[in-house]
Image: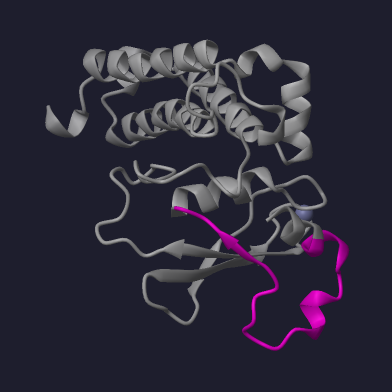
Amino acid sequence: MSEATLMMSSDAGAERVRPAGTPAVLLFARTFAEAHLYMDINPCECGESRFERDVEVLAQRDGVLPIRFAGDCERCGALREFTFQVPDRPGGPPAADSFSFPDDGPSGLIDPGQWWIAARTYGGIADTVAGGVDPERAWRDPEAWEDMVSILVNSAAAVDEALKFLPVGASAMPAGAFWTATGREVYQAVPDEFRRDILERERAERWARLREFTDTHPDPDEL
Ligand SMILES: [Zn+2]
């Protein structure tokens, strides 16, 4: 995977010379949610990660969906293109925004440092959103409620994903678990945050925050 990314950034000619319909790089994502997060954290050269994600299902194979997302960068207009191979599992993941299936191993796309950054980012978004609304009114809107639940789920599930990299019985994340520059950077900056006890506490707190939210503000569609 790191080799593939490297190829994508260094081999600028690949796009032009490859035969039509043959993706330059095939990324293995466990779910669509994981594929979308990967695109979120791998921005365009201009720094923007948003682009109109037109979806194309390429030749369908047994048990695997090759999916291409392509569109123009929202800021500079450059073509953004990602091709993923996603397992085509019946019924889809347990929740629409799950990054993986419970029996999946760790991600091959996003390293534990990046999951930890994602968890903190989602948590920060939840704080900002919650701080800017009147809770008595805001969470009666089904769309706003669903968005908030999704952010809180992502914030907790991203810690679950980081924990998947911890070897059984290990009390801290091994340095070798990080393979991206961003992941290594956050590990070097705050190595203690990758201790098992810290990650497990974070996970528990984040799932508890979700439960507290849904207990205090029940699904408006079910009221
Ligand atoms: Zn751009």
> Within the magenta stretch, is there residue 196?
no
Query: Residue 165's x, y, as percent?
Result: 55, 33
Query: Residue 195's x, y, as percent?
Result: 59, 15
User: Which quadrant, please, contains the C terminus?
Assistant: top left
Going 65% across and 30% down the picture, which residue do you hit? 113
Q: Residue furthest front?
A: 169
The part of the image, by quadrant, that contains residue 21 is bottom right
Total marks placed: 0
Q: Residue furthest bottom?
A: 19
Q: Which segment did they paint magenta? A: 7-30
Q: Residue furthest left?
A: 223
Residue 111 to residue 54: above or below: above
Going 26% across and 61% down the picture, which residue do you hit? 90
Residue nearest the viewer, comparing 212 with 166:
166
Going 69% across and 48% down the picture, which residue do you hit? 42
Query: Residue 50's x, y, as percent?
Result: 64, 50
> Within the magenta stretch, is there residue 15?
yes
Going 71% across and 88% down the picture, which residue do you hit? 19
Q: Is residue 74 left or right of residue 120?
A: right
Query: Residue 121's x, y, as percent?
Result: 59, 26
Residue nearest the viewer, comparing 122 with 168:
168
